[in-house]
Image: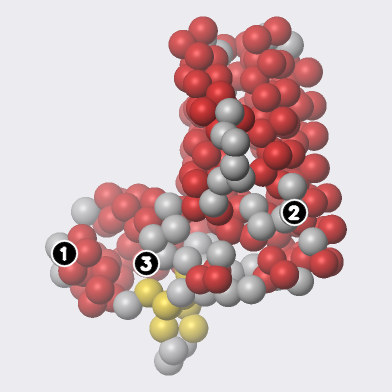
Amino acid sequence: MRTELVQLIREAILNREYLPGQKLVEEEICLKFGVSRTPIREALLVLEQEGLIDNQPHVGMFVISFRREEIIDLLRVEAAMEGLAAAEAAKRITPEEIIELESLQQEMSSRQQPVGQEEFFDYDRKIHAMLVRSSGSPTLINILEKQLSLVYLCRFYTIRAPDRYSHSVKEHQAIIDSFKSHDSLRSEKAAQDHLESVIKDFMRMANGKDAMADGKGN
């Protein structure tokens, strides 16, 4: 039960049901998942060890929030790991997976109006999840989907950068195009270039200060 709860609460955090800086109330989580407090506490301790939860003694448990430097470091880690995943995906990706990526990409690139932050966050996470899954590497998938869940929380902050949506759509397309050529080096560079672009946009955003507002304001 603990393992299942860890996954459920992790997904709730990554799906913005619990926002950065938000206090996690055990009673509310118990009601949400229909279980007792003991397995909830055990699951929260696991997520604390993963870095998703900040346990403040005598205050409570909170969804982790980040300093500017931490976000940049995590994005650099993501660039390295997703570069490897993209290189593997270029060799293994199936025509069906490319169609799935292009379908999502077409849906977003055809929009006439800028999308809201919630929709952008959902689209961005799906694209990256598909990229990682297409690598076919259990090790990379495990690291990026579980051990580095912190990376995905950074999107609460980076998606607010001006022009980030239009930049992401263009850069995601470059990754998809590289998959079509099945060129590992090109795919690795496309994925890394995308994350480097995210870092640059984030750093331009008033030196990152606007992005560090409470996640509830996102």
Which quadrant holds residue 72? bottom right
Q: Nearer the viewer, residue 114 or 2?
A: 114
Is 33 displayed left or right of 89 in the figure? left
Label 3 packing within 10 angstroms: few (<14), some (14-19), many (20+): many
The image position of residue 63, as x and y in percent, is: 48, 69
User: Looking at the image, is mark 2 or mark 3 earlier in the sequence?
Assistant: 3
Q: Which mark is residue 203?
A: none
Q: Earlier in the sequence, mark 3 or mark 1?
A: 1
Nearer to us: label 1 or label 2? 2
The total of numbered circles placed on residues is 3
For the residues carrying marks 2 and 3, which lies nearer the camera in this image? 2
Between 137 and 83, the one nearer to me in the picture: 83
Tag of residue 162: 2
Task: Compute the Cα span from label 1 to label 2.
Answer: 42 Å
The C terminus - image quarter = bottom right
Which residue in the protein does label 1 denote? 35
Type of the residue with mark 3: Leu
Q: Residue at coordinates 70% horizontally, 39% vertically from top-left?
A: 166
Q: Are there few (<14), some (14-19), or many (20+) residues within 10 Å of tag 1?
A: some
Instruction: Say whether residue 94 is left or right of residue 184.
Output: left
Q: Nearer the viewer, residue 92 or 158?
A: 158
Q: Which residue is mark 3?
A: 44
